[in-house]
Image: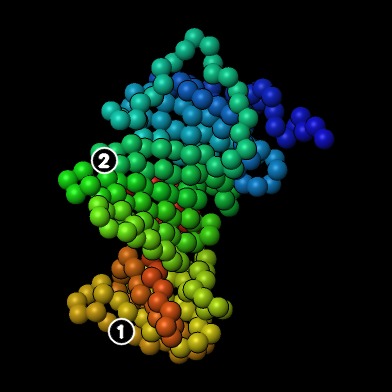
Amino acid sequence: MLLPVVFALAVPASFARMVEARLATTSMHVADWWVDDLDGDHAPESIAFVCDDDGGIFLVQHGSELLEAPVVVDGKNSCPTATSAPPAWRVKRSGVIVDEVHVHHGLSVSSFAVRDGQLVVVREESRNWDVNRDTSEEYHFNYDDLTWRQSIKAPHKPEVHTSGPLVLVTDQVRRTTRLLGRSTIAATHSPWMLHMHADRALMLRSCSVAPCETLYVAKGDSEVAIAADDELEIRAGRTTILVHFRMLEGEERYPHRPQW
C-alpha cells in the first residue's frame, strides 16, 4: 500500500512558508529538515533544524501551529554551515527528534516528541566520564513510561545497575506512577505531598533531612507530606523500590526542555 500523503516526498509548501516567516528577522538558516510522526497518529509532522553561530531551534508543524524547542550551539556543538541550496528533504520513522549535546567529559541526549499538542522531552540520557578515576556513569529517564535507570562502571569492579519508577511533581495530580502490583504514587508541590494508593502496607524512607525519616503507609488511599527531595526509598515486604522525582512548573505533564 502506497502512502504518498502520509510521508511526503518533498517539503510541503505550507511548512516552507512557516519556516521562512519564522527566520525572517533572524540570521538563522535551515540546516536540516525532514518528516516524521511525532505523536503516533500516523499523520507525520514536518520538522526543521534551524541555527546560526549563537543558537538553534527545532521547528515542528503540528496542525496549524509551529512548535519550537531550543538547541544548544557552542564550541562543542556547532551549527552546520549554510549552503547555497536548501538541504535535501528526508523521511524518518523514529517517532522522536534526537538532540545530542556534547559537554566536558560527557554527552546528554534529549528525545523530543509531540504530547498534548506540545513539543516536549519524552526521554533524556546522560553519559559522563571521570577520567581521573576511570569511571563512567549513564542515566536514562523515560517520561512516557515514567521509569529511570542508571549504570556505573568503575575499574576492577562489576558494573552496577539500578532502576525504578519516576514521579513527576506537578501543581496538581496530572499523571500517576505505578510502584508495584496495584500500588501507585503521584506527587504535588507547594508544599510537597505524596498521593498514594497502596494495595499493601508500605514503608517510606526519606533522607532529604538528617537524620533519615521513616513513614508508614497503610493499605488504601493516603496523602503524605514530605520534604522536597530527588529520591525516596519505598519498601514493600522484602521488595525495595527507589523512586526518583522530577519537578515540573506550570501545567506541564512532560518536561519542555533539557535540564542538563
Whole-percent x, y for residue 116 in the image: 58, 52
Q: Secondary structure at mark 2?
A: loop
Q: Is residue 230 above or below residue 236?
A: above
Q: How is the image coloured?
A: rainbow
Return the residue nearer the eye: 118 or 94. Answer: 94
Q: Are marks 1 and 2 in contact (CB under 8 Å)?
A: no
Q: Residue at x 34, y 85 (%)?
A: 215
The reply, left or right, for residue 91 in relation to residue 120 is right
Disc 2 designates what residue? 105
The dot on residue 214 is 1
The residue that appears at 30% across and 84% down in the rendered structure is 214
Q: Secondary structure at mark 1?
A: strand
| Residue farthest to the right, as pictured | 1
Q: Is residue 203 visible?
A: yes
Q: Which quadrant of the view contains residue 227?
A: bottom left
Count neighbours of disc 1 (C-alpha within 10 A) and say few if under 14, some if 14 to 19, many if 20 or more.
Answer: few
Does label 1 or label 2 sit earlier along the sequence?
Answer: 2
Image side of residue 33 versus residue 13, left or right: left
Question: Residue shown at 42%/83% (left/top)?
Answer: 238
Relative image position of residue 190 (x, y in whole percent): 35, 69
Give the amino acid type for the residue marked by disc 1 in the picture.
Thr
Please state which of the two labelled residues, at mark 1 or mark 2, is closer to the viewer. Answer: 2
Alpha carbon separation for disc pair 1 and 2? 38 Å
Could you tell me which quadrant the N terminus lies in?
A: top right
Q: Is residue 21 visible?
A: no
At x 70%, y 32%, the residue is 7
Work out which residue is located at the far top of the displayed protein and give it. Answer: 84
Along the viewing direction, whichever of 162 and 252 lies nearer the viewer: 162
Rate crowding at label 2 as few (under 14), some (14 to 19) or many (20 or more) other CA atoms within 10 Å. few
Is 1 in front, or is 194?
A: 1
